[in-house]
Image: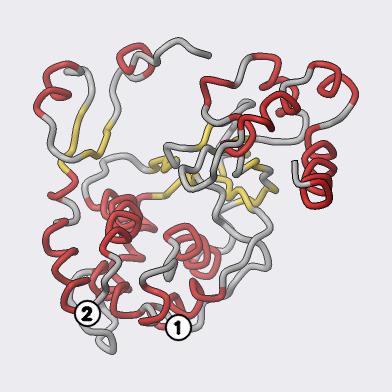
Amino acid sequence: MKKRIDLKSLYKKSNIIIPFNARLLKKYNSLIFIDENLLVPKKELKNLFFELGIEKLNRVGWYEQQFLKMAYSRICKNEYYLIWDSDTFPIKPVNMFENNHPIFDMIKDYNSAYFVTLSRLIPNLRFSTMSYISEHMIIKTEYMKNLLNEIESNSNIPGNLFWEKIIFSIDKNQIALSGFSEFETYGSYVDTRFPKIYRHRKWYSKRDASVFFGNIENVNENDLIWLSKDYDAISFENWNKFNKQYLEYVKNEKIQRKVRPKRFFKFFNRIKKNKNI
């Protein structure tokens, strides 16, 4: 797991959205790089936050990456495209289609702020009891373009572009936090407008893997085999703080042989609270 990933060996022809970088364009000429400012102009996005008096401009990037995933539909030439959070790693094979139907991977989660925003953008959508935020999603290009067009056609919200209207729809007390989800928005929209197209599947992800492993380089093949008994993916979100002391427990071979990962993490979290390890 310590070997550096070679982009050339992984992708023969892929679209990668990044800030303009001439060095990458030259080095990986088999890839198609798209300047993100052509999809969502960052300067205009920052200016809108500034005009609204939002002090936490560090959240601009968090919203921007969501808008980029949506805006890509307007230049995508394929029927489908896959969005996948870069801090999330699948640890078992993942098929995104079942009998030619795309699949939504669903988790247990809920954030009411997302649905307040969504109800303003597109009223009367049906909301699932499960969450669509599985850190990845297979997007039908046509449906995403329809979604953006519906948002932009809502004359009750200020702005012209979809991302402007999204920002204006978020509560002021939520915009500096987490007031919008592209996953919940697309999933709710599609399951309301096109209810027979997508299949649904439960998804199990260890989102705080960085607390125990630090980073993906500390995860070896045995760890992956063990984790895959209960999880489909692991995430290394940078706001989760790594504790080196936990690493010796999670990589203990005897524990891995005798205890399934979900049981281990549940038991370990209980011990942490009681003994402060």
Q: Mark 2 or mark 1, which is nearer the start of the sequence?
A: 2
Q: Which percent across, then down, holds residue 74?
A: 23, 52
The C terminus: image quadrant: top right
| Callout 1 secondary element | loop
Query: To which quarter of the image does residue 191 belong?
Result: bottom right
Residue neighbourhood size for the residue with mark 1, other residues' Cα within 10 Å, grouped as few (<14), some (14–19), many (≥20): few
Point 64% across, 34% down: residue: 212
Residue farthest to the right, as pictured: 258
Q: Which percent across, then down, holds residue 9?
A: 36, 11
Task: Please give left or right for residue 43 compared with residue 62 in the image.
Answer: left
The residue where tag 2 is placed is 52
Q: Nearer the viewer, residue 62 or 243?
A: 243
Which amino acid does the dot numbered 1 rest on? Pro
Q: Nearer the viewer, residue 102 or 204?
A: 204
Determine whether label 1 and label 2 are within 8 Å by CB: no
| Callout 2 secondary element | loop
Which amino acid does the dot numbered 2 rest on? Leu
The residue where tag 1 is placed is 123
Q: Nearer the viewer, residue 104 or 251?
A: 251
Point 28% across, 52% down: residue: 68
Q: Nearer the viewer, residue 205 or 182?
A: 205
Point 50% across, 63% down: residue: 184
Query: To which quarter of the image does residue 148 belong?
Result: bottom left
Point 61% across, 26% down: residue: 93
Q: Which percent across, then down, holds residue 64?
A: 28, 56
Q: Which percent across, then down, holds residue 178?
A: 44, 66
Task: Please give left or right for residue 39 compared with residue 221 in the image.
Answer: left
